[in-house]
Image: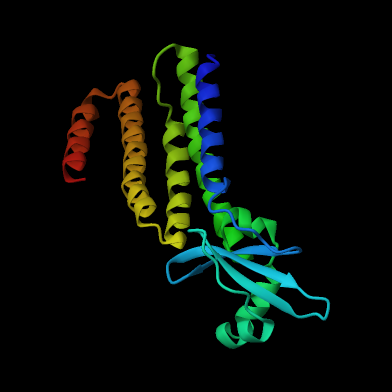
């Protein structure tokens, strides 16, 4: 097996991680600050939370374009956003998992896990197809490729729907139908081969005609 494709994959993975988690707009945070992701009216950034010695906290909104709000006091933050948002902001501040996955709670971690599962199945299908093709020295698409594609597509469709990502949803809807159709065609072909191997000349022509009629109607 060639090492160049593996090296190219690793380079692209590293590039993807850098794009997602690499440095964006740099902010000078205050000493002892904890950060958590936020999204407000289409604007994304990080919420800076600093705890004081008397148990109160102060906040700043750090926007992705490099700008930031003035320091917001504990009482003012609760007045603007309400006690429920305040409690969540205090609890989630500094949560590395939430920041890394760009979510705001443990429910989001669950949905991201579904997305990762789908992407793992997608990687597995390509890895399997690659290994089989390398062994046979020609491009081969095994049946398991389509099954992994189907389950991976369903998982990713679920994830993108939760993210409300129209590009991802659109891409998976078309793919799921194609994967399922390929699986059906494979099994129809196997049934025809089984009938032919059984050596039933009387029923073979009728079965072939029935298959042709079903194919035309499907």
Q: Residue drawn at (42%, 53%), measured in percent from left and top?
A: 157
In the image, residue 140 sits, relative to residue 63, either above or below, namely: above
Q: Position of residue 56 (x, y in %)?
A: 76, 80
The residue lying toward the viewer, choosing from 36 and 199, is 36
Q: Specify the quadrant that holds the N terminus.
A: top right
As drawn, which residue projects farthest toward the right?
53
Q: Position of residue 38 (x, y in %)?
A: 55, 66
Q: Quadrant of residue 181?
A: top left
Q: Residue drawn at (51%, 46%), measured in percent from left and top?
A: 118
In the image, residue 120 sits, relative to residue 127, either above or below, namely: below
Q: Position of residue 97 (x, y in %)?
A: 66, 56
Q: Specify the quadrant that holds the C terminus.
A: top left
Q: Quadrant of residue 90?
A: bottom right
Residue 202 located left or right of residue 101? left
The residue lying toward the viewer, choosing from 169 and 90, is 90
Q: Residue drawn at (16%, 41%), measured in percent from left and top?
A: 216
The residue lying toward the viewer, choosing from 45 and 195, is 45
Q: Position of residue 150 (x, y in %)?
A: 42, 43
Residue 202 located left or right of residue 15? left
* Total numbered badges shown on the rendered structure: 0
């Amino acid at each position: 097996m060639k090492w160049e494709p593996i090296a190219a994959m690793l380079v692209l993975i590293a590039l993807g991680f850098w794009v997602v988690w690499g440095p964006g707009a740099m902010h000078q945070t205050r000493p002892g600050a904890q950060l958590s992701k936020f999204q407000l009216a289409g604007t994304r950034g990080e919420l800076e939370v600093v705890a004081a010695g008397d148990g109160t906290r102060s906040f700043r909104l750090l926007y992705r374009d490099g700008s930031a709000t003035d320091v917001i006091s504990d009482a003012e933050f609760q007045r603007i956003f309400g006690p429920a948002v305040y409690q969540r902001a205090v609890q989630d501040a500094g949560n590395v998992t939430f920041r890394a996955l760009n979510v705001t709670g443990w429910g989001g971690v669950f949905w991201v896990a579904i997305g990762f599962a789908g992407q793992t199945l997608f990687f597995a299908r390509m890895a399997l197809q690659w290994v089989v093709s390398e062994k046979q020295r020609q491009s081969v698409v095994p049946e398991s490729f389509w099954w992994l594609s189907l389950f991976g597509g369903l998982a990713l469709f679920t994830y993108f729907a939760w993210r409300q990502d129209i590009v991802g949803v659109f891409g998976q809807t078309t793919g799921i139908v194609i994967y399922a159709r390929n699986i059906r065609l494979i099994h129809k072909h196997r049934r025809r081969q089984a009938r032919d191997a059984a050596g039933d000349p009387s029923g073979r022509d009728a079965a072939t005609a029935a298959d042709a009629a079903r194919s035309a109607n499907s």
